[in-house]
């Protein structure tokens, strides 16, 4: 059995996910970093291990429910425990509702929402046996307030909130918490591609007048995964610089 606490993090190869992997490793977790391709993921894990942390890459297509469930089971079986689950992976297929086809809607729901359902259902068993665990789902301000051109994405992220609140109620008796972090505009590859004009317009509705950093999301995740959040469950923590939607 692994003496370190074990965390399973999806979408761990870049942006917010990479920051979460790095922060949890810094906090003493052995982190299973999950993504669809190896290159960036392996580099992140190698750096963590070289600096004295503990992380391993795991390649999984999270839209493949069977493979995803098997990955969670393998983690719990190999290490003898699964303390923290972070559902971070997500995709966008933006478009106005009248032009959005079924494939784009289904792909976003499957990747962003169904994958979380699959990992939670699978992780709940070893967590229940251990009489404790933390489940943290990364939603979005789009899931709280909606966003034009993102009906599929907003639906998936709002669904994560409902899923989390239900799971929190179901698993509380086993000392398992389930919470949501809802980021606003964060400096990632996705936002870096926006034009300066769009960035300036967005900053006008953010009282702090800047985009957040991935590490600022990771800090909130670290709190929810750590010892100071034992009485926090079923909550949505919005981290958006005070943005007015």
Image (cartoon, rainbow, N blue to C red):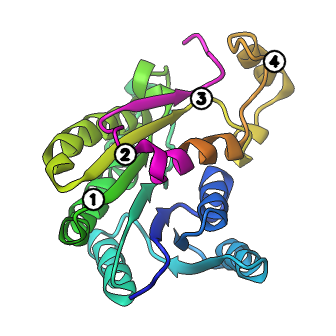
Badge 3 density bin: few <14, some 14–19, many ≥20, Cα 10 Å: many
Give me the C-alpha separation between circle 2 and circle 4. 39 Å
Q: Which residue is under mark 3?
A: 184
| Contact (Cβ within 8 Å) of mark 3 with mark 1 | no
Crowdedness near tag 4: few (<14), some (14–19) or many (≥20) residues, C-alpha within 10 Å: few
Asked if the residues shown at circle 2 and circle 1 are in contact, with their CB atoms under 8 angstroms apart, the answer is no
Asked if residue 201 lies left or right of residue 8, the reply is right
Nearest to the observer: residue 2 or residue 41: 2
Residue at the spot of label 2: 230
Q: Earlier in the sequence, mark 2 or mark 4?
A: 4
Which of marks 1 and 2 precedes in the sequence? 1
Q: x%, y% of residue 111?
A: 39, 55
Instruction: Report the span colored magenta.
Output: 221-245
The alpha-carbon separation of the residues under discs 2 and 1 comes to: 19 Å
- Marks 2 and 3, how far apart in space? 25 Å
Mark 4 / mark 3, whichever is N-terminal: 3
Residue at x 67%, y 52% (from the top left corner)? 15
Q: Is residue 89 visible?
A: yes
Counting from the top left corner in percent of width and height, residue 91 is at: 50, 49
Q: Is residue 242 magenta?
A: yes
Q: Which mark is residue 200?
A: 4
Residue 50 is one of the magenta-drawn residues: no
Circle nearer the N terminus (1, 4): 1
Give the spatial CA distance, label 4 vs label 3: 15 Å
Numbered circles on residues, count: 4
Cα distance between the residues tagged 1 and 4: 38 Å
> Which residue is labeled 1 in the image?
120
Which residue is located at x 25 percent, y 34 percent?
162
């Amino acid at each position: 059995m692994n003496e370190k606490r074990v965390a399973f993090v999806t979408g761990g190869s870049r942006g917010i996910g990479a920051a979460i992997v790095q922060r949890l490793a810094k906090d003493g977790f052995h982190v299973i970093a999950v993504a669809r391709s190896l290159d960036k993921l392996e580099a992140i894990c190698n750096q963590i291990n070289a600096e004295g942390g503990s992380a391993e890459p795991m390649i999984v297509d999270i839209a493949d429910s069977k493979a995803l469930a098997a990955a969670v089971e393998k983690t719990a079986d190999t290490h003898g425990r699964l303390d923290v689950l972070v559902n971070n992976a997500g995709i966008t297929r933006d478009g106005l509702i009248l032009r959005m086809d079924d494939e784009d809607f289904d792909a976003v729901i499957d990747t962003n929402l169904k994958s979380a359902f699959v990992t939670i259902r699978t992780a709940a068993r070893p967590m229940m046996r251990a009489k404790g665990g933390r489940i943290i789902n990364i939603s979005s301000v789009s899931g709280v307030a909606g966003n034009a051109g993102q009906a599929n994405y907003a639906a998936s992220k709002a669904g994560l909130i409902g899923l989390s609140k239900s799971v929190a109620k179901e698993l509380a008796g086993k000392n398992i918490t389930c919470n949501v972090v809802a980021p606003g505009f964060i400096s990632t590859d996705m936002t870096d591609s926006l034009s300066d004009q769009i960035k300036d317009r967005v900053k006008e509705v953010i009282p702090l007048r800047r985009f957040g950093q991935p590490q600022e999301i990771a800090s909130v995740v670290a709190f929810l995964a750590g010892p100071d959040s034992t009485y926090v469950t079923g909550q949505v923590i919005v981290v958006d610089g005070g943005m007015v939607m």
